[in-house]
Image (tube, rainbow, N blue to C red):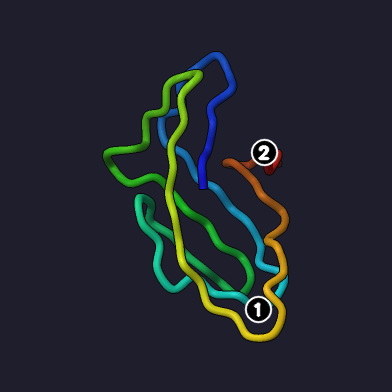
Amino acid sequence: MKLANTGTSAWSGWSLGWSFAGGQTVSQLWNADYTQSGAAVTAKNVGWNGNVAAGSSVSFGFTGNWSGSNAKPTAFKLGDQSCTVV
């Protein structure tokens, strides 16, 4: 996942939350810490990638597990703000 800071000020720490719609679970995630409770997942910066300058971005990745359909995740939030998925 790539988080782009399109604002005019730097981020000092970040978190991205989303919900899985098809029973998926995160099995491994890198370049961030994460928690998962049921369908809800939250990824947070690790020490070295928390500061993101305006106009810059930060990335992390994950692998997951599912059975049946692999529905797209929903309800993305950067901090407490809804965000656009592109």
Is 42 on the left-hand or right-hand side of 28?
A: right
Q: Upstream in the sequence, badge 1 or badge 2?
A: 1
- SS under mark 2: strand
Crowd band around label 2 with a 10 angstrom C-alpha radius: few (<14), some (14–19), many (20+): few
Residue 83 rendering spot, x and y as whole percentages:
68, 39
Is 1 on the left-hand or right-hand side of 45?
A: right
- Residue that appears at 42% across and 21% down: 53
Residue 6 rendering spot, x and y as whole percentages:
58, 23
In the rendered image, which quarter is residue 19 located in? bottom right
Q: Nearer the viewer, mark 1 or mark 2?
A: 1
Q: Which mark is residue 23?
A: 1
Q: Quarter holding the C terminus?
A: top right
Could you tell me if the residues under marks 1 and 2 are in contact, i.e. CB atoms within 8 Å?
Answer: no
- Residue that appears at 59% across and 80% down: 66
- Vertical placement of residue 64 versus 4, above or below: below
- Residue that appears at 45% across and 61% down: 62
User: Mark 2: which amino acid?
Assistant: Gln
- SS under mark 1: loop
Residue 20 rendering spot, x and y as whole percentages:
66, 67
Q: Nearer the viewer, residue 51 or 22?
A: 22
User: Mark 1: which amino acid?
Assistant: Gly
Q: Can you name the residue that lies furthest to the top here?
A: 8
Q: Which mark is residue 34?
A: none
Is 65 on the left-hand or right-hand side of 71?
A: left
Q: Can you name the residue that lies furthest to the left here?
A: 48
Q: Which mark is residue 81?
A: 2
In the rendered image, which quarter is residue 75 located in? bottom right
- Vertical placement of residue 64 versus 44, above or below: below
- Vertical placement of residue 25 versus 5, above or below: below
- Vertical placement of residue 12 versus 34, above or below: above
Cα gap from disc 1 to disc 2, whole angstroms: 24 Å
